[in-house]
Amino acid sequence: MDLADLDPDPVAQLRAWLDDAAAAAPRPDAMVVATATPDGRPSARVVLLRGLDERGLVFYTNRESRKGCELAESPWAAAVLHWWELGRQVRVEGAVEEVAREESEAYWATRPRASRLAAWASPQSSALAGRDELEGRYAEAAARFGGGEIALPVFWGGYRIAPASFEFWTHRDDRLHDRIAYRLTPSGWERERLAP
Ligand SMILES: Cc1cc2nc3c(=O)[nH]c(=O)nc-3n(C[C@H](O)[C@H](O)[C@H](O)COP(=O)(O)O)c2cc1C
């Protein structure tokens, strides 16, 4: 892989790789997002990439979850997408902001009813007395909403990682893999090759 093989716009490049992955990988939009406590202790988990444009990468979650609490105090994240089938990895790092409520509402409306009830039922990242507690909370939410509209909870919504850097990695059998890094500067995106 050469610089010339990649789009100078990293968002366009990521979109192209996501398109390739959609044809090759079972879950092309799964990404690991790492957050950290203010004293620098990281935590990481898989979420689904639900939006991508020039402003950044969007995922949805519970704002009171472990990641939500960490982001409230340290609004910065690192994300990794990896497609084994393509031998490709993308890394992204940047400041994180909450997605506007109207945008979260638009996404919320596309979620299946059961997923919306589950979001209401699950105090994500909190300890549960047992599986019964979770199922009880789900049944309670289902009874409360009945067949009516299920509103977006105030504790749930999107986060956008506004990229300050990207890295595009491709596998080579000789282990001399290719890595091209993008860094956002006042004059735009700058690129350089990194040692594997
Ligand atoms: C394939 C996959 C996709 C997931 N997608 C999401 C997601 O989009 N949002 C979310 O909150 N959790 C998602 N999860 C669950 C998270 O990995 C994690 O368990 C949860 O968000 C709690 O993380 P936290 O306690 O670090 O906040 C997903 C897990 C897997 C394995």
Image (cartoon, rainbow, N blue to C red):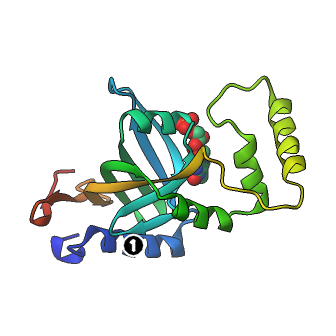
Which is nearer the eye, 48 or 6?
48
* Label 1: few (<14), some (14–19) or many (≥20) C-alpha neighbours in 10 Å: few
Q: Is residue 83 visible?
A: no
Quadrant of res 26: bottom right
The residue carrying mark 1 has its beta carbon less than 8 Å from ligand 1: no
Q: Where's residue 142, x and y in %?
A: 86, 50
Q: Is residue 176 left or right of residue 29?
A: left
In which quadrant of this rendering is ligand 1 seen? Answer: top right
Query: Would residue 107 be visible to someone looking at this image?
Result: yes
Q: Is residue 59 above or below residue 125?
A: below
User: In percent of the image, x 57 and y 36: which residue is there?
Assistant: 65
Rendered residue at 44%/75% (across/down): 20
Residue 40 sits in which quadrant?
A: top left
Q: Is residue 63 depicted above or below 162 in this figure? A: above
Can you tell which quarter of the image residue 25 is in?
bottom right
Q: Which residue is mark 1?
A: 15
Q: Position of residue 9 (x, y in %)?
A: 24, 72
Observer-nearest residue: 8 or 94?
94
Residue 58: give x, y in percent of width and height: 46, 59
Q: Mark 1 falls on what kind of element?
A: helix
Give the residue type that dot 1 points to. Arg
Q: Residue at horizontal 84%, vertical 53%?
A: 145
Where residue 8 appears, as percent x and y from the top left, is 20, 73
* 53 vs 78, nearest the viewer: 53
Q: Residue at x 46, y 38 (%)?
A: 44
